[in-house]
Amino acid sequence: MSAVRLVDSHCHLDYPDFAEEGVEAVVRRAEEAGVTHFLTICVEVEKFQQVLDVAEKFSNMHCTVGTHPHHAAEELHVTREELVRIAANPKVVGIGETGLDYYYNHSPAEEQKKGFATHIEAALETRLPLVVHTRDADVDTIDVLTSAGQKDARGVMHCFSGDINLARKSLDLGFYISFSGIITFKKADELREVVKFVPQDRMLIETDAPYLAPMPHRGKRNEPSFVKHTANMVAQIKEMSLADVGDVTARNFFSLFDKIEEAV
């Protein structure tokens, strides 16, 4: 077992990418690499049960409930009340993945914003953090968080790929910034500047597995054990030890997702 303590704050372990090998093997390999906790993320409320089924297999795994902006048009029927009801489950520690994605525009922008606002309302009622996806939608993301959230919503900008301006506005709203394997990519110099900018006490790390495998695994299926490569890059950029990056990001994770009782 590794002496380094890491948390994968965002992965999708219910996805079929892990079915052949089995999630148990993937989790075991991650634990050997030092990953002590996992947050597996819901992207469609209608498939929440399969997310929960995975999370319930492991004492060190929790989950969220929410609709990814890609599916906003399909799940406009999802209400604040439904999200609040599901979030009462002890395994559910956050609302999302929600937000805005104008890069792919799989759902119309107005429907994305409506769904996003519903999730924010549920987060405020449950006092749970939001897991926010934003791509090519910086202005509207901050606008919706400010208006629907009344500056009281809290959460994380997951898999951050924006610029320092978006990072600053997110931090001003009290949000955390989560970095993925993208920061290890050769052409990610601008994003590495964001890593340098974000304070230690506001950063998280994640894999977004099975997507975005970090170097040297780029192009392969991502998995939680690979979060160590992202942590290593953060350590280089912030001039910290790997152990310190692990400790800081783990503390930040449990501070944000405070429904989880951190194991001492």
Image: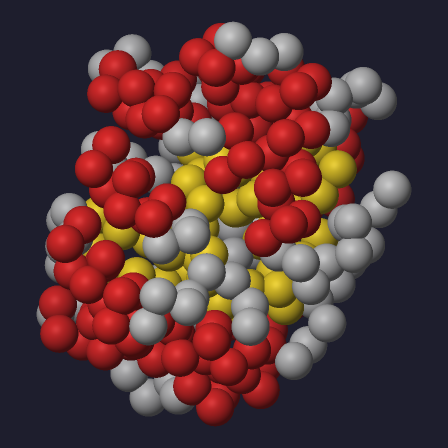
Q: Where 67 sits versus 193, above or below?
A: below
Q: Where is residue 249 in the image (x, y as percent from the top left)?
A: 60, 34
Q: Where is residue 217 in the image (x, y as percent from the top left)?
A: 46, 18
Residue 182 visible somewhere in the drawing: yes
Residue that sits furthest to the right in the current view: 264
Viewer-nearest residue: 105 or 119? 119
Q: Where 178 sits versus 226, above or below?
A: below
Please indicate whether residue 170 sits to the left or right of residue 8 in the image: left
Q: Position of residue 104 (x, y in %)?
A: 16, 52
- Which residue is drawn at the image coordinates 87% and 42% (left, top)? 264
- Which residue is drawn at the image coordinates 52% and 9% (left, top)? 239
Q: How is this picture coloured?
A: secondary structure
Residue 220 visible somewhere in the drawing: no
Viewer-nearest residue: 27 or 161? 161
Quarter the N terminus occupies: top right
Q: Where is residue 92 in the image (x, y as percent from the top left)?
A: 63, 68
Q: Where 239 sits versus 18, above or below?
A: above
- Which residue is drawn at the image coordinates 66% and 37% (left, top)? 250
Q: Quadrant of residue 139?
A: bottom left
